[in-house]
Image: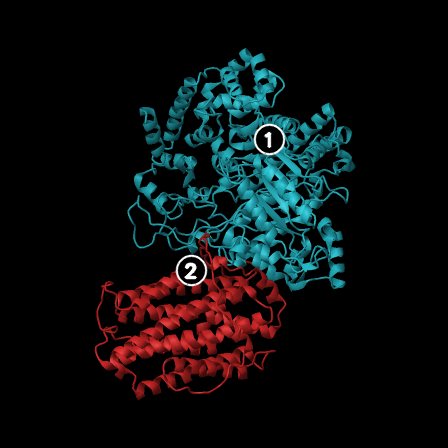
Chain colours: A cyan, B red
Amino acid sequence: MTDRRLMIENAAAGVFADPENSKVAARLLAEEIAEEAAGQGVERFSDSVRIAHEQGLLADRTAEFVAEHAGTLDAMIDDAADDRFEYFGLRTVYDRYLLRHPVTRKVLERPQHFLLRVACGLSESPAEAAELYALMSGLAYLPSSPTLFNAGAVRPQLSSCFLLDSPRDELEGIYERYGQVARLSKYAGGIGISWTRVRSRGSLIRGTNGHSNGIVPWLRTLDASVAAVNQGGRRKGAACVYLEPWHADVEEFLELRDNTGEEARRTHNLNLANWIPDEFMRRVEADEDWSLFDPKVTPELTDLWGEEFTEAYRRAEKDGLAVRTVPARQLYGRMMRTLAQTGNGWMTFKDAANRTSNQTARPENVIHLSNLCTEILEVTSDGETAVCNLGSVNLAAHLGPGGVDFARLRATVRTAVRFLDRTIDLGMYPTPEAAAANTRWRPVGLGVMGLADVFFALRLPFDSPEALTLSTRIAEEIALAAFTESADLAERFGAHPSYDQTRAADGVLHVDHYDSAGQGPEWDALRARIARTGLRNSLIVAIAPTATIASIAGCYECIEPQVSNLFKRETLSGEFLQVNRYLVRDLRERGLWTPEIRDEIKRGEGSIQHIAAIPAELKTLYRTAWELPQKALIDLAAARQPYVDQGQSLNLFMATPTIGKLSSMYAYAWKAGLKTTYYLRSRPATRIAQTTVAAAAPAVRPEPAAQAAQSPRAAESPEFTVTDAVACSLENPEICEACQ
Amino acid sequence: MLLDPGMNLTLRPMRYPDFYERYRAAIRNTWTVEEVDLHSDLADLTAMTDQERHLINRLVAFFATGDSIVANNLVLNLYKHVNAPEARLYLSRQLFEEAVHVQFYLTLLDTYLPDHDERAKAFAAVEHIPSIRDKAEFCFRWIDSLGDLDELRTREDRKAFLLNLICFAACIEGLFFYGAFAYVYWLRSRGLLDGLATGTNWVFRDESMHMEFAFSVVDVARAEEPSLFDDEMATRVTRMMEEAVAAELAFAHDLCGDGLPGMSAQDMRLYLEYVADQRLRRLGLPIRYGSANPFPFMELQDVQELANFFERRVSAYQVAVEGNVAFDETF
């Protein structure tokens, strides 16, 4: 090990004592990377691209573009921009994003080369490349991982998500889908797939005069297929299966992720989501019965939503077509149990998704599912696989002296949308169904990250009214800029081909579905503008989870609160301590950043609520996701929803979930008008003993938070036996790099 | 002698090669729960009448605890007092098999009872279902009967131990389980619950061997000390058998109610008496009932050969989630 490597490790280990060590380690790592690249003959950007092209890693087009403009592009490289990286972010770039020599595995580019290479892969002129590179090197905007991985590459699969309609209810259709899923997974796309059209257990199979075994055996095959395609690849395959709750196999579906029971009826690799019509939630509320149908008998239900669905559903009931009837609350309770035990079985709402979507103006265009991360909502059909290209704005990089710099935010958004739109034309599509859909609808998903940074910097508690107002304003500004840019693009290149099938073509924008949203002269002007030009993109905004790109940017993930003031990231390349630097700054100012307090934060597993020396104001600001009322997270999301024309990957947090709390929470989310929710995060029941802090008295338990009612969890989990360095044991979020 | 106190460790020369052969045979019969396909059972369960489902639920509730009780006695009493290393080898193997049975019935219940409340109730059957509780209490009584005997020093001690051994072999594995198996095979004779029947076949085979091993131990002890089997012993074993039949019959009444097609408490009584007689006969005691087997489907049962096994992932267990659907809780 070189001396520098040792110094890097020492600095990284000292992050908790002094967060500045993160920057120190990052700087040393940047030197290390530069040296490694130099060893491969890489000094200038144009060297990097030439060598990577010679090794077959980059496309001819990229190499030619860079060769042609070598001088200009080489001059753009701003190595000082490396100083913006925190250690974990740069380490992530180094371990997983930089191009490597196929044989020596040494890096062929420096971090800034990598960002400019991505920019060049998406640009038609050096000026364009400069514009995008400036945003990326400033960590103000990052495209999603597939774009970062593949822009400029030989096979530029740039899309994050693919949404496949349910296979047709026949053997051939099902096997076709397996093939499509395999091809899409191969290039690191996350898969969402509905299974609602496939007949349920006991349904007659005419061809053989036998009876169907239902959907579970098919999903087992899907499970194995998804896992197999990615073996030995860059990451584990990832897919989410959507099912509507009227499907007669829904109960077995909800058990697919259980760790107990018959292994032959379990799918450990698949994520599960419920695609819920309003009628179900109404019956849960009214404590009525719920009928389960065989989709072979009621095929129309899959393609209907809203009142038409409700009518058809009730008609089918009246006609006695139900396979079985269960109390709606019983099924709802089972959904909640699945969420509590597996974090899976995401609650996503079919009617809200369809009612407000720009794509569903015509009855033949229906949204049948969301994606792997529940932020994409696009129509699918047997011949159309929905695709989405994503990128996220780092809000933390748009803070000025007076708060959020909205002018700069708008400028970033416009550039971002332009390049997202570009990826539609540059991307390689693994299946013709995906290519067909993407060129017709041209949807993109612009998201955000670093909202929690903004709140910390401006000292706004996550559940304060000011935070709600600011968060909503940010969403509105982004929507205005994004729609304006898409109208500009439509003016230059024409509206997307299926524009006449959208609600926008009928004069209805997404925001118009929400009372009191989208008011004012700017919106009026935008409506007039779009009426004239149309839109280049049928959908524009989606809040993706951003786990990996937020790491690179060194900000909190998407719209999420912090999970802990101190936690450990576990990756293939090691464990990284992450500490809330805003908290450290505040404690330092008060002379409270002492070894004793640091030990207390460890004992509290990253909570500060139990530490008497810390003032109440800080305790309120620095609550963790486990200590915040989840109602606030839902309220923020609901207020933002008018400006998010797709969905939001909204994780909810509950340390010790109960059926009662969960059912209240998800019913609230539905009523608040959310289109989707994502994981339910909960904490494991037992933990290993701490070793790096002396055991305190029998049980150290945080006092209830400043606002006692807002910290039910801390109060309810008395066992603080605790992990070593305060790991926040979320399910490993790295399974999906697609949206991140 | 086999029941002498102590911890004999000498395998050569081997005193009881028969026990060692049984141990080796048992290993060849290894099976794993993952090999049992319960898939088709679920469809059958949904098609059943309430009465049939009641029978199944009670049955699996008994299974949920039965093998655990046997395993406990094995550890607490049998292993301690059967003083031959080759016999202890077999008992070690038997303990593993009991664990597999426990796992099988656990998996069965988890699969059959998707409703978590029902599932929890089934696992707690020993506490609140009288017909199951009575059988469990019968077992516990016999486990406890040796509770304070650390060594078998006197003839009375050895008689007490043999009674415990006979109870577990003849009454619990040999009667309670055989009764339960009969319900399973009755269902299978009607084309139902093939998965359960497959697993039960394998459990059945194991239990047969456990019983035979125990009876061999009795045989050896008896040969080594013939006076153990006196009239008092005969009387006590017969009385124990009667108690076991009564407990199992009460269970049958609970399961069958007024009777199902092809299965009733009356038939079950005859069957249990028939089985009890067989156990007594095996022990060289006079038969007690003289009943004939009323169940033709039991005659058909033959232990299948099991060729292979393979490994799968280990199941983990999860914390239960509490509570009911509500809309006004704080979150």
Q: Say which of A145 and A307 sits in front.
A: A145
Helix, strand or loop at label 1? It is: loop
Coordinates of residue A410 in the picture (x, y in percent): 61, 28
Q: For the residues tagged 1 and 2, is the chain the same?
A: no
Q: Is residue B53 left or right of residue B18?
A: right
Q: Position of residue B19 (x, y in %)?
A: 32, 67
Q: Is residue B239 in sight in this rendering?
A: yes
Give neighbour class at mark 1: few <14, some 14-19, many 20+ (Cα, 10 Å).
many
> Which residue is painted at 51% across and 73% down in the image?
B58
Q: Position of residue A128 (x, y in %)?
A: 61, 19
Q: Is residue B113 visible?
A: no
Q: Amino acid at mark 1?
A: Gln
Quadrant hosting residue A157 = top right
Say what amino acid the circle numbered 2 marks. Thr
Is A529 in front, or is A89? A89
Residue to which mark 2 is pinned: B30
